[in-house]
Amino acid sequence: MDEGLLTQRLQQSLRFSKRIQPAHAAVLIAITQEDNPRILLTRRSLYMNNHAGEVSFPGGKRDAQDTSNIVVALREAQEETALNPFDVQLLGDLPMQKARNGMLVKPIVGLIPPDVNLIPQPTEIDRIFFASLRQLLETPPTPYEVRFAQQSLYFPSLRVENEIVWGLTARMLISLFQYGLNYQKEWPFLLNSPSFHLGREP
């Protein structure tokens, strides 16, 4: 797939679902409109109560006055990264995802200018960075160890821009590839062996 065609494919494939279900939270999957499109990602501050230090899309919980999932995603993205909502060309949404804590999260997808000026909100975001959409598509999943009380489990992850993308954020990317680009990326629920690599069963 030519890189210039990636954003065209997204524009053709994505729509907003007709059945509106208010989510507990929403995130914005913002993709730069250029020949080699990049996806906007953030690393959450180590001082956050939830998911500290993890890579995520800009987004957050619904406020009482928020009128739609789109409003939540755009407002939170502006608060966290200073992204102007008027710089976002909305394309559609992806299926609802359930976070580890049971919260329902709605991904909203949009295109943004490649030269947009962003500023991290220091109490929430440690880093703003962009990852190549093509690289995310082509990078094989690698094991990420999560330690629980009794054992370690290895979840699939993507290593990009010296960061680890896993969990809910990674599942949303897989959903974006599936619904926006008709691309089914191999993504097992668990990678039980740290030596796992594509082409061999764990």
Image (cartoon, rainbow, N blue to C red):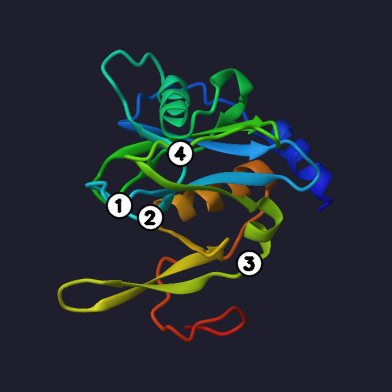
Q: CA distance from mark 3 to mark 2?
A: 19 Å
Q: Which residue is mark 4?
A: 120
Mark 1 surroundings within 10 Å by alpha-carbon count, few (fewer than 14), some (14 through 19), many (20 or more): few
Mark 3 or 4, closer to the camera: 4
Q: Which residue is mark 3?
A: 139
Q: Earlier in the sequence, mark 3 or mark 4?
A: 4
Disc 1 versus disc 2: distance between alpha carbons? 6 Å
- Gap between marks 3 and 4 measured at Cα: 27 Å
Point out the frontmost of discs 3 and 2: 2
Whether the residues at callouts 3 and 2 have beta carbons within 8 Å, the answer is no
- Identify which residue is drawn at 68% across, 64% down: 138
Q: Nearer the viewer, mark 2 or mark 4?
A: 4
Whether residue 187 appears in this view of the structure is no
State the residue in front, 47 or 156: 47
Does 197 appear above or below 23? below
Q: Which residue is mark 1?
A: 51
Residue indicated by mark 2:
54
- Disc with the residue nearer the chain's start (1 vs 3): 1
Q: Residue 101: horizontal and vertical position, in percent?
A: 23, 48
Circle 3 — which element?
Answer: loop
Q: In what element is the residue under mark 1?
A: loop
Front one among 199 and 156:
156
Instruction: Identify residue type, mark 3.
Output: Thr
Quick one: label 2 or label 4, which is nearer the N terminus? 2
Report x, y in % for residue 175: 54, 48
Q: Amino acid at mark 2?
A: Glu
Check the image and report above or below for 26 versus 48.
above
**CA distance separating discs 2 and 4:** 15 Å
